[in-house]
Amino acid sequence: MEADWPKGYKTVRRPIVTVLDKMIAQDLLKTLLSVLSVIVVIIVSRQFVRILDKAIEGQVSNETLFSILALKTIVASIAFLPAALFMAVLMVLGRMFRDQEMSAVFSAGGGAGTIYRAVFLLVFPLSVLTVGLSLYVAPWAEARMEQLMQMDEQSADIRGIAAGKFTEYSHGDLVFYVEKISSDKKMHQVFVQHRQGDRLAIINAEEGRVEDLPDGRYMILERGERVEGQPGQVNYIIENFIEYAVRIDEKTSAGAVDKEAVPFNLLWGSDVVRDIAEVQRRFSIPLGVVFLTFLAVPLAQTSPRGGVYGNMMVAFLIYFSYGNLVRVSHSWVIKETIPAWLGGFWVYFVLSIIGGILLAKLYGWKWVVLRIREKVAR
């Protein structure tokens, strides 16, 4: 009995997205979100502690605190996306090697191309999305953080005044104590210590309030006594007043803007070396997504009896070296040690070579030699 295959079995149309593609892409996405969440929480938590110190000192308001935390989360998520994806690919494919799932794939005729197809089903659209995030979203978040910090610095000298406690500002030049604050924000039984150079003024007033006048911000004190002099000397000025104003000078924020916060359209096409280096730094994130994934596929190969973490130590050393080389290249471009057109692109050329060597190791060097001989023979 003969099988009725008029056109042959190879003419069966292959689906665009196979079951294997869906399985690997879904596992990779879940692992990526988990790893990225852990990394971002660790990094942002450390930064949040420093911001919290500024909030306690009165340099950052409570309203701004959570806005800065959200913006830093966005920036950290974009910056560490290549690292999280690199680890996610290693974890997913490493588990498949340990569970003999890769052996089943290779036995069915699949190879590295099959695995790359499934992985880049997620990585390719993610890399396109990362271009927009790195070039536009991250600079916007950095610029917004700088704007919020500058707005808070201008009013830092009067923030945090609360009833029943001493509050210190301007590096100790201003110390306030308010016994009571009424519902109309008027302060009662106010103590102020104001240092101006070598002279020190102590002011006690029954009431006080803060007003913004055309020439600056003032604390207006009512019905009190003022003592001014230089500690260690006897020539003091003692005076009583009905109304006395203490000017609180607003801090002038620096006009310089961090390069990381400059919009991409202002950097693109610039001949300034620092602008070129910043553009290359932003492109390093989507490039890292692609090239680190290319490297992770053969690097994930482990034996069934291998440890749970497989080649994680080797992967960590590779990523650590990659990150340092990218930063060093950025510094070299700024110092004009290497040409600006070269930048950090040589790092990805090195990653391609390492990935090719790992792929050859995955297939076996004899197989590579045979394939080369076949190509030469043709």
Image: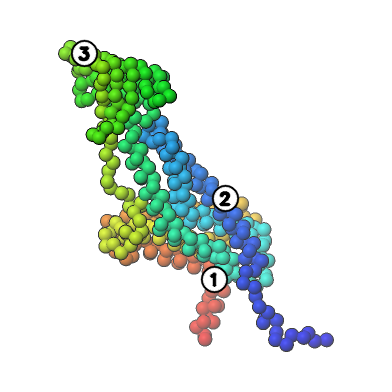
Q: Name the residue under label 1.
A: 365
Looking at this view, is 58 or 75 the one in front?
A: 58
Picture mark count: 3
The earlier-in-sequence mark between 2 and 3 is 2
Is there a contact, CB below 8 Å, between mark 2 and mark 1?
Answer: no
Q: Comparing marks 2 and 1, which lies closer to the viewer?
A: 2
Residue 11 visible (yes or no): yes
Residue 317 visible (yes or no): no
| Residue positioned 33% across, 25% down in the render | 209
| Residue positioned 33% across, 52% down in the render | 259
Looking at this view, is 101 or 174 the one in front?
A: 174
The earlier-in-sequence mark between 1 and 3 is 3
The earlier-in-sequence mark between 2 and 1 is 2
Please, what is the three-letter code of the amino acid marked with disc 3?
Ile
| Residue positioned 46% across, 49% down in the render | 74
Alpha-carbon distance for marks 1 and 3? 93 Å
Kindly indicate the quadrant of the structure image that contains residue 168: top left
- Residue 311 in the image: x percent, y percent? 55, 55
Please, what is the three-letter code of the amino acid marked with disc 1?
Trp
Residues packed near mark 3 inside 10 Å, few (<14), some (14 to 19) or many (20 plus): few
Please, what is the three-letter code of the amino acid marked with disc 2?
Ser
| Residue positioned 40% across, 25% down in the render | 184
In this picture, residue 91 sits left or right of residue 210: right
Q: Comparing marks 1 and 3, which lies closer to the viewer?
A: 3
- Residue 48 in the image: x percent, y percent? 45, 39
Q: Name the residue under label 3.
A: 238
Alpha-carbon distance for marks 2 and 3? 66 Å
Against 282, residue 111 (above or below) is below
The local secondary structure at tag 2 comes to helix
Q: Residue furthest right?
A: 1
Q: Which labelled disc corresponds to residue 34?
A: 2
